[in-house]
Image (cartoon, grey):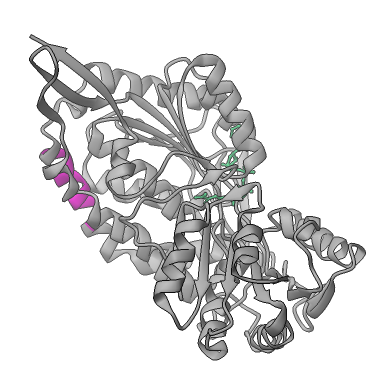
């Protein structure tokens, strides 16, 4: 049981001004795994005020970038030592299989903590350019107070991808983790306290939609960095638009894995087993539309059904588990609704279907499901389900496969599976998605990540992630 009785406001632990407690229950068996205070609007006010004062008057934005990098390196060292604790806590909160918690949920943030600081040396904080009327200086200055709002599915990846580049740029940051996963954010706050950042620079204040909305609207927040669903992203974008506030959005996906006719099906299934069902299917970039040629459609469906049946479903703390429970009752109901919808739309569940797997009645477990007989107009092919549900769609030829992959409101990710890497890379160039894999899907944490179309605006990670937290200033004379 991991309980916090205070919030991390302006770098200090403070009681919430309200009495609401977030109780986190294990999605595996419903036991209470921790509690945290729910931030009120007054708590958000206090966090933003601390960030604002620190930005206007404090040392942090004025430090040499290498000194900010040194603080992040101290944080990385603490993170390295306490990774196992963080991974176990995330599995407690959201039911992520422990092997993925170790590899992805905390492995990727650690790579970012290690990968971002070296970027500050080469970053063009101030450069001289020659224009048509002579020389001028271009400066990159921190954007100001950042409000970071994150989802529960990969909570540390999302927080670290915003917090670390924003800090390196010289911003001060108020993070609002989701109410489903407030505990890992507050554990990170302990690491931040130990690493020693100046007062006011970091606040971590978990809360619900109202707290998020209040942070978005706050007049002293200069930039909102949001990761979550596309409907909430649209709402946040509209509010930021009205206020001419900077905003970046990492939203949903419905990514297509194109299986070419020359693909080795055994290798392809080994890959899809992970990239389509990763994190119990609760991954923005999960490859949830599998596109197979008509000639090979039945073979691909059979192979995917066999693979899916083979995945151990159960206690997420068991190292053998590949599919754990969904995060919550709400998410379970959503996934069940889509499984029922697929059947109504005429798709056939060749494995899985509605209800809970045998023997797992005590948690929010869904049956890993593969739908065949799907065409790309069906809602199960167009909408993000966010659970272990994959649809297999037939294509006529390669052009048709690319057309179907692109026929989506989303454009977050994609992959192609083929014996001919050159042909795969040619397809990668034609699909309108922010990240792409040939015979894999697993973007480097220092590569630009984000979405085309309704999958978002802006890019996180790597140099582009750092550039997202600066304003440009041209100085003449
Ligand atoms: P969500 O949009 O419901 O919530 C995300 C966050 O926003 C939470 O902290 C929530 O409390 C807050 N929030 C909710 N309503 C708000 C409002 N009106 N104003 C301000 N904040 C508000 O999403 P979710 O269900 O927590 O997460 C799942 C979604 O996140 C999926 O769509 C998934 O694809 C997406 N996601 C995207 C990425 C990416 O990098 N593109 C990564 C992870 C998850």
Query: Residue pushed farthest top?
Result: 477
Q: Quadrant of ligand 1?
A: top right
Is residue 31 visible to us here? no
- Foreground: 29 or 6? 29
Identify the image quadrant of residue 322.
bottom right
Q: Is residue 70 rendered magenta in the image?
A: yes
- Foreground: 175 or 29? 175
Is residue 271 visible to us here? yes
**Residue 117 pos. (x, y %):** 19, 48
Q: Is residue 253 above or below residue 349?
A: above
Give the residue drawn at x 20%, y 29%.
Answer: 60
**Residue 423 pos. (x, y %):** 45, 72
Q: Is residue 303 rendered magenta in the image?
A: no
**Residue 84 pos. (x, y %):** 37, 69
Give the residue drawn at x 68%, y 84%.
Answer: 296
**Residue 300 pos. (x, y %):** 67, 83
Part of the protein shown in magenta: 67-76
Q: Is residue 36 above or below residue 144?
A: below
Q: Is residue 56 left or right of residue 64?
A: right
Q: Is residue 217 above or below residue 332?
A: above
């Amino acid at each position: 049981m991991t309980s916090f009785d205070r919030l991390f406001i302006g770098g200090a632990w403070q009681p919430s001004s309200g009495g609401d407690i977030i109780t986190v229950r294990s999605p595996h068996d419903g036991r209470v795994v921790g509690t945290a205070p729910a931030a009120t609007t007054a708590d958000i006010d206090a966090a933003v005020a601390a960030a604002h004062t620190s930005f206007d008057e404090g040392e942090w934005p004025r430090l040499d970038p290498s000194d900010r990098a040194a603080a992040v390196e101290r944080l990385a060292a603490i993170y390295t030592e306490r990774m196992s604790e963080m991974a176990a806590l995330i599995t407690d909160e959201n039911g992520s299989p422990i092997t993925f918690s170790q590899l992805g949920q905390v492995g990727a943030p650690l790579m970012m903590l290690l990968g971002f600081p070296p970027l500050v040396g080469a970053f063009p904080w101030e450069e001289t350019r020659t224009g048509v009327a002579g020389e001028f200086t271009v400066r990159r200055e921190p954007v100001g107070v950042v409000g970071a709002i994150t989802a529960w599915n990969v909570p540390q990846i999302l927080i670290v991808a915003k917090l670390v580049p924003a800090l390196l740029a010289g911003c001060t940051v108020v993070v609002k983790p989701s109410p489903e996963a407030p505990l890992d954010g507050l554990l990170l706050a302990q690491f931040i306290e130990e690493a020693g950042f100046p007062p006011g620079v970091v606040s971590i204040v978990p809360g619900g939609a109202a707290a998020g909305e209040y942070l978005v609207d706050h007049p002293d927040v200069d930039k909102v960095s949001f990761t979550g669903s596309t409907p909430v992203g649209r709402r946040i974008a509209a509010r930021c638009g009205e206020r001419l506030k900077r905003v970046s959005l990492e939203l949903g996906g419905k990514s297509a894995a194109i299986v070419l006719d020359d693909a080795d099906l055994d290798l392809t299934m080994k890959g899809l087993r992970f990239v389509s069902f990763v994190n119990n299917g609760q991954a923005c970039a999960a490859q949830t539309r599998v596109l197979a040629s008509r000639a090979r459609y039945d073979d691909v469906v059979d192979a995917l059904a066999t693979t899916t049946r083979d995945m151990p479903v159960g206690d997420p703390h068991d190292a053998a588990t590949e599919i754990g429970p969904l995060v919550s009752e709400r998410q379970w109901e959503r996934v069940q609704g889509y499984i029922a919808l697929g059947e109504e739309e005429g798709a056939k569940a060749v494995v899985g279907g509605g209800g809970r797997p045998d023997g797992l009645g005590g948690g929010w477990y869904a049956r890993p499901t593969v739908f065949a007989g799907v065409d790309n107009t069906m809602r199960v092919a167009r909408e993000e389900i966010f659970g272990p549900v994959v649809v297999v769609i037939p294509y006529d030829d390669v052009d048709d496969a690319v057309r179907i992959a692109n026929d989506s409101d989303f454009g977050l990710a994609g992959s192609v599976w083929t014996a001919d890497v050159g042909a795969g890379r040619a397809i990668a160039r034609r699909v309108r998605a922010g990240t792409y894999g040939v015979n894999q899907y697993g973007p480097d944490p220092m590569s630009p990540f984000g979405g085309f179309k309704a999958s978002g605006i802006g890019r996180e990670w790597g140099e582009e992630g750092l550039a997202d937290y600066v304003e440009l200033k041209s100085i003449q004379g």
